[in-house]
Image (cartoon, rainbow, N blue to C red):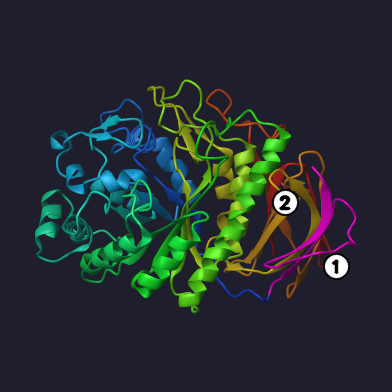
Amino acid sequence: MRKQLMTFVVPALALAMNVSAQDVKITIHANQGRDKINKEIYGQFAEHLGSCIYGGLWVGPESNIPNTDGYRTDVLQALKALKVPVLRWPGGCFADEYHWMDGIGPRERRPKMQNNNWGGTIEDNSFGTHEFLNLCERLGAEPYISGNVGSGSVEELAKWVEYMTSDGDTPMANLRRKNGREKSWNVKYLGIGNESWGCGGNMRPEYYSDLFRRYAVYCRNYDNHRLYKIASGASDYDYSWTKVLMDNVGNRMNGLSLHYYTVTGWSGSKGSATKFSKDDYYWTLGKCLEIEDVIKKHSAIMDGKDPGKKIGLLVDEWGTWWDEEPGTTRGHLYQQNTMRDAFVAALSLNVFHRHVDRVKMANIAQIVNVLQSMILTDTKGTGHMVLTPTYHVFRMYQPFQEAMALPLDVKCDSMKVRDNRTIPMVSASAAKTKDGAIVVSLANVSLDKAQEVEFAIDGMTAKAINGEVLASKNITDYNDFAHPETVKPAVFKEASIKKNIVKVKIPAASIVVLNIK
């Protein structure tokens, strides 16, 4: 891997040759913020996949595992601490085979179903509409419902919207009341289909565009509810899908989804989550950062029809995808979560911050026990739970939610990595919070060298600084049930302020979040 010297200017990139190795300079423009970082960028995704729902979020009220009305108490508390802003459900691919009326009414009378997308698991539908929406209320999260377009009907989705959001004397509202819920839920986000180009129906974009227009008509706004209708968008590099939808649907949609996974490919081995080389690690970061170019290209297409940026781009599936852990159920996508995954989370969030004029939501895949999850649980009845390094990144980044994104100039070294990608050795982001503080994230991706960072803040006099750091002995380190705190945040002490210049020494392979007042 060949190193070169570059200046990274956010949002633009420009070349510079006047900074010595490991000498990083940053300028934060505290008075030039224009766009808010929607809290929904820190959204989560819960699909009926493996043990995400059953054994992860839900064990049922009769379980020996401590629970609160059927929700795992330890997971519930951990998610409350994370301040989850929005939660997407029931899929994913599962959504387009899910018939919501099978998941309401007395649990003992609900029909079972086979999960054809994920391992052929038989599910009892004990976790349905009431259980999901009540969970969102407990967490203070906005529910994001993915509707069944692939195998469902317009009538089915229309009735689901009525069931959830109508307070009138209507058939579905009365059915909801019969099932124990008097008042409607506050449901804002509605996805009309999921991955309609693939598992959601294998459709052409022209055909899906017409379906969206039809479904959207009958998904009504009841009483004071106003739905934010989201079209099933492209997978990573499929720019033609976005163009067709912008041409044929346009402002009939409020948002357009985008899926992007940091994955080696869709056939054969995707690589181990815990056993990887330095070269694999740096390649992963290069692939992760390519999402920025993908967002720019989709945004440019959207700008052609929507220059006012009224239609949001929602990255409602993103994250790492590795091979399943040995000994786990095939098709359940249970993978461990190392410091490498924490870097993917930090770098991706930093990218989203740079594009908040168009990116209005992002939902990492997934919340518990699946892919790049926040939490891992032992589903064999022992009741163990562990927080992943990715969880800690999301918790450390909380101050960015609803803060004003700030432009910043970053001068640092870069590295050429496999597949002809280039990565900066320091990824940074900054925002101004409602109380006037500046929050800064700094990720030193180098595995062997600390970074001396010096930054100035235009438009603010810095007086006090504190922060946290997430690091570990090895980039392959992770938390498991026997060692739940191998990777955890610590107080960061290597920061000082002198004459409004902040100096920071970031250890190798570490993620730092600073709060400056």
Q: Are marks 2 and 1 in contact (CB under 8 Å)?
A: no
In the picture provided, is 454 more to the left or to the right than 105? right
Q: Nearer the viewer, residue 436 or 151?
A: 151
Which residue appears at 55% of the width and 27% of the height?
Answer: 480
Q: Which mark is residue 499?
A: 1
Specify the quadrant that holds the N terminus. Answer: top right
Which residue is labeled 2 in the image?
A: 423
Which residue appears at 58% of the width and 32% of the height?
Answer: 271
Residue 185 on image: x %, y %: 26, 58
Residue 302 on image: x %, y %: 48, 71
Q: In this rendering, does residue 189 appear at all?
A: no
Residue 489 on image: x %, y %: 64, 42
Magenta highlight range? 1-30
Residue 21 located within the stretch drawn in magenta = yes
In the picture provided, is 348 more to the left or to the right than 154? right
Q: In this rendering, does residue 486 appear at all?
A: yes
Kind of residue indicated by mark 2: Ile
Q: Residue furthest top?
A: 327
| Residue 183 occupies quadrant | bottom left
Count of labels shown? 2
- Which-is-in-front pick, marks 2 and 1? 2
Tag 2 secondary structure: strand
Tag 1 secondary structure: loop
| Residue 269 occupies quadrant | top right
Task: Bin the neighbour count of mark 2 within 10 Å (Cα to Cα): few under 14, some 14-19, many 20 and up.
Answer: many
